[in-house]
Image (spheres, grey):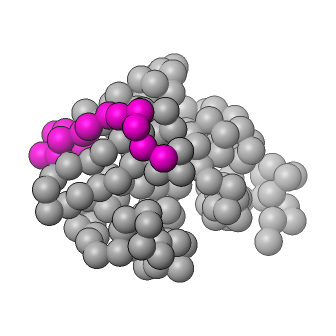
Amino acid sequence: MYDGPNGIEEIQDDLIRKIKNMGFDCVKTGDLAPQLHASLYQNRNVLIINAETITVFDLEHEIIHIEEHHNGRILWDNGNDERNYNEAEANKMAISRILSAHCSNGWSPNYYDIMFWYGIPYFLENEVKEQLKNIYGNYFGEFKNVQ
């Protein structure tokens, strides 16, 4: 994954292949509400993907749920948010994987661009900055005063 100058669609296709190789069916549809990017049904081995709004971050996030065997409160409409342990863990791990792959290619460490390119939600900005700071230290001036 992320091993070449692939476009975002190619990265998404790679991640969907990974999910399928984990034994899950991926169903793409354009009939979901815009705020629902993906919905994982662990007990049925199905991931429903909103073809209009899916992002690399969303797919990495769902892969974490699969790998970590998260279940229970992982549907978008049942009080899910970053305070839910499964969600917080999936968010941090997805960001870590994205940044690791992105930075290992020598691509720009600009957090805004990274968040935009991979579809990382705005409320995770501080997590992205913190992880970039851990990768690059204080080398880049824009991270010297990250709090």
Residue 95: percent from left, percent from top: 52, 55
Q: Quadrant of residue 133?
A: bottom right
User: Is residue 21 among the parts visible in the rendering?
Assistant: yes
Quadrant that contains the C terminus: bottom right
* Image location of residue 17, percent across then percent down: 25, 33
Q: Residue at the location (47% across, 76% down)?
A: 79
Q: Residue at x 18, y 41 (%)?
A: 25
Q: Quadrant of residue 66?
A: bottom left
Question: Which residue appears at 46% of the width and 24% of the height?
Answer: 9
The picture places residue 62, in percent across and down from the top left corner, at 35, 54
Q: Nearer the viewer, residue 126 or 62?
A: 62
Compared across the picture, whether 89 is left or right of 130 comes to left
Q: Say if 74 sits above or below 117 in the image.
A: below
Q: Quadrant of the N terminus?
A: top left
Q: Is residue 89 magenta?
A: no
Q: Say which of 15 and 26 sits in front.
A: 26
Query: Which region is colored magenta?
Result: 18-33
Based on the picture, tell me whether residue 19 belongs to the magenta stretch. yes
Answer yes or no: is residue 133 visible: no
Q: Is residue 97 above or below residue 144?
A: above
- Comparing 95 with 51, the one in front is 51
